[in-house]
Each structure stands twice: as structure tokens, then as C-alpha cells.
Amino acid sequence: MDYRLLKGLMLISMAAAIAGCALEPSQRAQRVLPAYPEMVSDCAFIGGVTGNAPALALPIGEQYAKYQALDEAAALGATHIVWADTSGGLFPGFIPGFQPVAQGRAYYCDPDRALPNSYRYIDQYLRLHRYPYDGDRD
């Protein structure tokens, strides 16, 4: 049997398996909720966050960058994030400096403070349906 052919098939199957892998955000990143600017108008701005994906993470690079930004926002103590820019790059992975990037603004919203009715329902829906929680619910 031709070992080069076998080696090539092995590499192709490994690349397909890696490309099909699903990403999961970290436990703390799951608690940061995406929001519109109007939803966080009464919240405290914490800071800007940025997530970068490896240049070779082509099929899942943008999602990886978002999860990295969510994790950074959670480390700052944010409860909500407003996405400023998410891009997959011009030619992600092929040209250096063009890897997928996700940028957002992190906010802390006091859970004891009442949200306007129209936003309260959106916030409750996002908290219940954003991701399954492994630990305690907020």
C-alpha cells in the first residue's frame, strides 16, 4: 500500500475532524449576555474587550474570537457586552495580521436595579436561553 496516499488521507480526515469541532465558551463567559446599546444605557461601562483567534482557525475563528472576548469581559466582572465589531478578516489565516477579531464594550448592570419593562423581558429571555448552565444560575 502506498504510505504517502495513506498519510494524505489521514491528514485530510484529521483536518475535517478538527474543522467540525464545536466550541464551547467558558463557564464564566456564559454569564455575559449580548445586549443592544439601549439595554445598557443605565449600566456601568467597564471597558473595551478584544478577542483574537489563531490564524489557522478558519471555519470557527470568528466564534473563537467572540468567546475569547466574552471571557475577557467576564474576567472584568461584566454582565453584558455590546458587540462593536466582529470580523473574519479579509483572508483569515492566509495573510498574517488578518486573523478573526471580535471587539466589544463590557458593561456591569446591577441585577437589583429594575430594567424598563421592554428590556426586562429580553434580559430574562437571554438569561434563560443563552446557554445551558452547568453550575448555579444567577
Image (spheres, grey):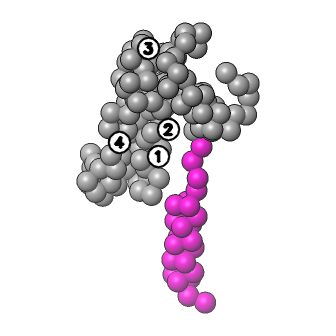
- Do the residues under discs 2 and 1 have CB atoms within 8 angstroms? yes
- Up-down: is 120 above or below 97? above
23 or 57, nearer to the observer: 23
Disc with the residue nearer the chain's start (3 vs 2): 3
Q: Circle 2 — which element?
A: helix
Q: Indicate the amino acid at tag 3.
A: Cys
Tell me if residue 19 is in the magenta stretch: yes
Mark toward the viewer: 3 or 1: 3
Residue 113 is situated, as x and y percent measured from the top left of the image, at 55, 9
Mark toward the viewer: 4 or 3: 3
Q: Quadrant of the C terminus?
A: top right
At 57% across and 71% down in the image, what residue appears? Answer: 13
At 49% across and 18% down in the image, what residue appears? Answer: 116
Q: Would you name the residue on which mark 2 appears?
A: 67
Disc with the residue nearer the chain's start (3 vs 1): 3
Q: Which mark is residue 43?
A: 3
Q: CA distance from mark 3 to mark 2?
A: 22 Å
At 42% across and 13% down in the image, what residue appears? Answer: 42
Q: Would you name the residue on which mark 4 appears?
A: 86
**Does residue 72 show up?**
no
Badge 2 crowding class, 10 Å Cα cut-off, few under 14, some 14 to 19, many 20 or more, is many
Residue 135 is situated, as x and y percent measured from the top left of the image, at 73, 28
Q: Would you name the residue on which mark 1 appears?
A: 63
Q: Indicate the amino acid at tag 2.
A: Tyr
- Do the residues under discs 3 and 1 have CB atoms within 8 angstroms? no
Q: Circle 4 — which element?
A: strand
Kindly report the secondary structure that dominates the magenta region of the rendered protein. Answer: helix
Disc with the residue nearer the chain's start (4 vs 2): 2
Q: Quadrant of the N terminus?
A: bottom right
Please give the range of residues in magenta.
1-24
